[in-house]
Image (spheres, rainbow, N blue to C red):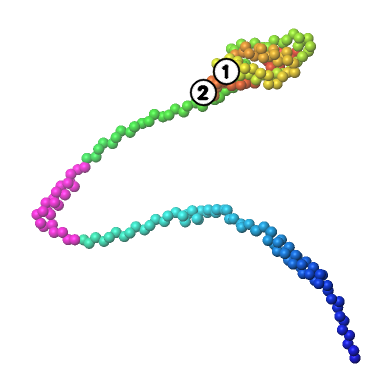
Amino acid sequence: MSSSITVLPAIPLRERVSVVVLVLLVHAGLVFVWMMQPAQPKLAVNEMSVSVAMQQAAVIQPQAEPPLPKVQAKTVRTDTPVIRRVVNEAADDVAQPVVSAPPAPAVTTPATVAAAPVVDSEPDYKASYLNNPRPAYPMVARRMGWQGRVILNVEVLSEGACGAVNVLHSSGHEVLDNAAMNTVKSWRFVPASHAGRVVTQWFKVPIVFSLEDNAV
């Protein structure tokens, strides 16, 4: 009975070296990837819990008072002349009546009168005693049928006079805006008040030019 032995072909040295190098590269790559992983940050506990029980425990407990030392009673003889004289003088002092001083008169404090609240006010141009004239409707605007509403930004001085004036919103027609500005510059105002004092303040004055109702 014959047995046959299969002989495997020999692996060339170059291929074996290549396999070893490949295995080493794979291991080196795994080690490199593991080292490049970021370290897990440590969780920082940043909270404070304070309860009523903790606050009560933090209060310093009062210390018990130390016991008073015992005083031994000593028998004192009162039959001697010196002791009898001291006892008699003490008895005389106790027997003297105590005169109390008369009570001091009560001092009455006058009641404080509550001050009236100070109300701030805005400038005013509609008071009847100011006699502010209405802007004249320009003749060219009447002929052209121009109408509109202009809002002026007016600086009302603390003495009630008009300071600077500029157009905040135009009526769409310069002739109407100029007519309103020229008239308002001659107006008198009731100045604004703040904390009980008159102050200079900017104020918005709307003026409507209408062919049906020419009113301020």
Is 46 rendered above or below residue 10?
A: above
Residue topped by disc 2: 196
Quadrant of the frame with the N terminus: bottom right
Residue sitting at x 24%, y 40%: 100
Is 18 rendered above or below residue 208?
A: below
Mark nearest the camera among 2 and 1 is: 1
Question: How far across and how far down the image is residue 93, in percent?
Answer: 17, 46
Over which residues does the magenta segment extend?
A: 74-98
Q: Dot 2: what SS? A: loop
Amino acid on which the number 2 mark rests in the picture: Gly
Is 100 rendered above or below residue 89?
A: above
Residue topped by disc 1: 157
Q: Dot 1: what SS? A: loop
Crowding at label 1, few (<14), some or many (≥20) Cα neighbours within 10 Å?
many
Question: How far across and how far down the image is residue 34, in percent?
Answer: 69, 62
Rendered image quadrant of residue 175: top right
**Frontmost residue, 11 versus 178:** 11
Q: Main secondary structure of the magenta part?
A: helix
